[in-house]
Image (cartoon, rainbow, N blue to C red):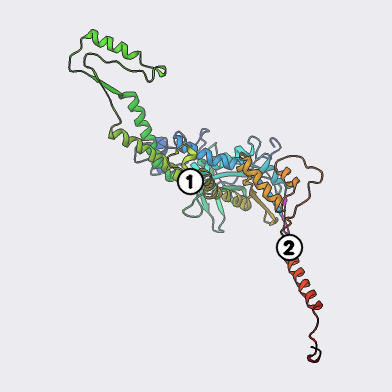
Amino acid sequence: MTHGIPSIPLARPIDGAAAPAPRAAGQSVFIDSLTDGRLEEFLRGGAATASGIAVSAEAALSVATAHRCVTLITGAVASMPIDLKRRAGKLRLDADDHPLWRVLRKRPNPWQTPSQFKRYMQACVLLRKGGFARIVRSGRKITALIPLHPDRVVEVRQLPDLTLAFDYLRPDGGRVTIPQKDMFYLCGLSLDGVRSMSVLAYARETVGESLALAAHARNLFRNGTAIGGVLSSDKRLTPEQRDSLREELESFRGASNTGKNLILQDGLKYDRLGLTLQDAQFIQSRELSQLEVCMFFGTPPHMVGLTTKTTSWGSGIEQQSQGFVTYTLQDWLTMWDEAIARDLVDDAEPQLYARHNTNALVRGDIKTRFAAYAVGRQWGWLSANDVLEKEDENPIEGGDTYLSPSNMQDAVAAADATSKLLAGDAASKPEDQPDGDK
């Protein structure tokens, strides 16, 4: 027992397989064949690409565009709180009395905060082969989620009973099987419905191209020469004239000397050199590579600093940002919500469910937030205290009153009122008189 968390019992070894000899602690990879593709990846430091660059998760994060895409998605997921709700008829109540509430909202494990845990798990889905966390229970109550490094989960298998089993390589070299009931599993895009494929697995060639272009640029600046202009003359300059000209040109260096006029003598001419076709093509290649990285991660270019392409998902920045939430984040949030329902919610509690509170995305936009509150107040589904609660403020006296628009009424009540009005008109109308009295 450590920090109030029960120790995790060792799972049984894989049937029919002897545990390998103990290894040194570290990011070990279990390879049982010389033809295993992971052996080449290990020796190269990452998966090889056509550009000749080995791309690992760490190397991918050294590309500014990929790093920003990953931090945008993981940061958005980490900053949104997970609401644990309980259905009671048509009511939706906070299940803050449930043990899972504390794990999801307060402390998933002894050393991580909820945002750290969610950020790490989401990064594993983007850059590795899924997010894995060992479920720790005390009786039937979940007390902690212990994240596992994806590289140590060497295999995800489907058993004959259609449940999953996770083969895990422990730091001491032992290989164990963790059943599905003891694993919280975040699975992204899958080609077989069982194993998750990381975004990096498909973007590796594009990231490798970005790394190769960056390496070429570094070598160009280190070994190449870039000339801004050329001074030419029909006459041959003496060494003294060259030294005098060089000293004069040095006085024009620096930002404070920008815009000064250069006086040329003895028939000297100055020609400015522009970009060559090779230079322009190199810059265009880098921009295209950056855009392709954004496409793989589903991130609008303007959110990573590429402002030349700002109309991909709408006519303005606001529409593109909403597109990022709708078409990128919502996919990942659905993965989280459904994985929590499958792995962490007991089947005996079907009324319990988890939902990400996307209101956190507009916390920084006070105008949009208050405009939404105003609509809710005017149309009667928010009270003053409801708004204050969402803003984490104290309630006010009389703030539980709900307003009703004066020009709106209940449709059933309106129909009843119309029926009564028509019935009253019919009763007050005089009956037709006999023909003789007319």
Q: Secondary structure at mark 2?
A: loop
Identified at 55% across, 36% down, the residue is 172
The dot on residue 436 is: none
Q: Earlier in the sequence, mark 1 or mark 2?
A: 1
Point out the residue furthest to the top here: 240
Spot occupied by residue 367 in the image (x, y as percentages of width and height) = 63, 41
Q: Magenta includes 109?
A: no
- Magenta extent: 87-94
The dot on residue 298 is: 1
Spot occupied by residue 134 in the image (x, y as percentages of width and height) = 61, 44
Left or right: 368 as drawn, with respect to 226: right
Observer-nearest of 168 and 127: 127
- Label 1 crowd (10 A; few <14 / some 14-19 / many >=20): some
Q: Secondary structure at mark 1?
A: loop
Q: Which residue is mark 2?
A: 410
The secondary structure making up most of the magenta span is strand
- Residue 295 makes an appearance in the image: yes
